[in-house]
Amino acid sequence: MIPAIQVDQVVKRYGGLTALAGVSLQIEQGEFFGLLGPNGAGKTTLISILAGLNIATSGSTSVMGYDVVRDYRGARRALGVVPQELVFDPFFTVREALTIQSGYFGLRDNDAWIDELLDCLDLNDKADTNMRQLSGGMKRRVLIGQALVHKPPVIVLDEPTAGVDVELRQSLWQFIRRLNQDGHTIVLTTHYLEEAEALCGRIAMLKQGEIVANDTTQNLLKRFSGCQVNLKLAPPGLPAALQYLLAHGGGEDCRLALDSYDGVEQVLATLRSAGVGVLEMEVAHPDLEEVFVKIMNH
Amino acid sequence: MSAEFKQPETIARAGALTGFYTLFYKEWLRFWKVNIQTVLAPVLSALLFLLVFGHTLRNTGEPYPGVGYSAFLAPGLAMMSILQNAFANSSSSLMQSKMTGNIIFVLLPPLSHREFFFAYLLAAIARGLVCGAGVLLCTVWFVELRCEHPLWVAVFALLGSAIMGVLGIIAGLQSSKVDELAAFQNFIILPLTFLSGVFYSMYSLPPFWQKLSHLNPFFYIVDGFRYGFFGVGDVSPWLSAVVVAVCLLVLSMLTLWLVKTGYKMRH
């Protein structure tokens, strides 16, 4: 099967600044893919190259098998992009904005689909409202509608929930999850790592223009994150033999950082042999934030 | 966000020219929705010029035999309106889109550089012609205007609005701030327009300035347009048409290349 997105050795330089330093990436059709990285890592640059908004210095990029430069018409028809910035055209209503965007993609008589989009995005009662009069959350929904108006198989969402309230964020994620279930390939960038962890099947992390991790979410969590054990101990507290595992606290109230769950048994055995009773114990699950921090600080 | 989302269809086949037509229509709507500002205001300005200059300079003699100053002035003012509004349409639309970021709505779809160029150009021509027609329709109430060669009037109205539409695209691409566009407008377009013979015949100027006027392509546009009305001009309408057409062709080729390379749009 043709990959939804193929990125080969893409380099992007702005004068002396290297924004992307030979990035290669393949995203399969139907994936929910996360692209993570700190500010300035090159995420938006990569997305802009995919969308044809930026031109790569070298390397090649394709969407659904269409090269974004040579076969730009095919590539752009296959791609819907929800930009990070809340941009809108103040001259038009919501319905006009969607109809115009549809026309740009060569689609006439697309009203049935536009009605369905308005319905899906809870914008029915705002269809004839000027874009200027919408709240930030509603503008964000219109941007999603504009990205979907030509039914693209690949959808890129560049921080779609930045500055969005919790309720709208939840409903947006439900909607996007359903898009993925219906067969769309989703590429997501976000700073909300718990959301990326919950939604994305695979994640790539960018740092200073290079991919420093690219694996399934589960593998990343296993590979880079051990577990943490929070302990409340009977006196005399943590024995000297376990001091090297101490991550936080000390004595009778401490947190130990272990490489894996296998280490829990060894900790308990050491406590037993030292005659220290365990009053409370909690094993904390690894999370993506911890993995992210480890990788970025590596 | 409750309704079912349908399974996506295969990538839609684009209707021929639909993208181009949509972009043109969007640009048309953009100025027509605010026609008080984009059409009525320029027409009113031209009428004020006609009334004030026509009245104060009515005794300066006939610029052409049998043509009074007000009648002489009317086509010039109509062309000035055509030129300034055609320029304003493409330049302000592009500059504002770049400034606000909504240019991405045009850059993300599969529009070719030709579709992009011709849609902006056609919309600029449309606004120029609407304003020019508005000025002429209003001036016939105040001056007696004959039209000896309607075809030349149409040719120079089209060439004039087209050349300014193209210059507007260049200015819009070049400018990323309001003051950059204002500089282009105030230091290039406005002097060339005012010194193009809108308010005077070239033969009323000293010899040096007459020669200098020949270097101003806008002079040929105004003179050719006026020839269409009175059957008399400072130079042959054929010469004017060739000069303007060559300028239009060169500027169009340059602009098409700029759009194709994504100049100041695709980084």
Image (spheres, coloured by chain):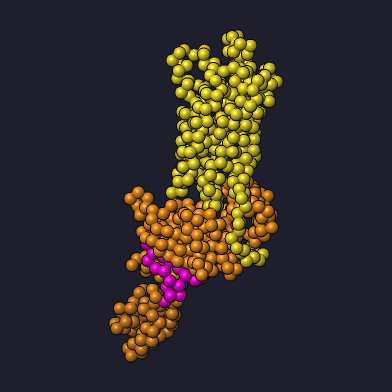
Chain colours: A orange, B yellow
Which residue is at a point 45% across and 72% down the rendered structure image? A216
Which residue is at a point 37% across and 77% down the rendered structure image? A257
Give the image location of residue A129, x and y in percent: 66, 49
Question: Is residue B108 in sight in this rendering?
Answer: yes
Which residue is at a point 52% across and 12% down the rendered structure image? B204
Q: Nearer the viewer, residue B234 or A20?
A: B234
Which residue is at a point 48% across and 56% down the rendered structure image? A68
Q: Is residue A292 left or right of residue B11?
A: left
Quadrant of res A177: bottom right
Which residue is at the far left? A240
Give the image location of residue A121, x and y in percent: 63, 59
Which residue is at the far right? B141
Figure check: B249 above or below A118? above
Which residue is at the far front? B238
Figure check: A213 above or below A245? above
Q: Is residue A101 left or right of residue A217?
A: right
Q: How many marks?
A: 0
Q: Is residue A250 left or right of residue B166?
A: left
Give the image location of residue A176, x and y in percent: 57, 64
Q: Nearer the viewer, residue B92 or A69?
A: A69
User: What residue range appears in magenta?
Assistant: A196-222
Question: Is residue B54 in sight in this rendering?
Answer: no
Q: Nearer the viewer, residue A120 or B206?
A: B206
Give the image location of residue A48, x and y in percent: 47, 55
Quadrant of res B232: top right
Figure check: A221 above or below A21? below
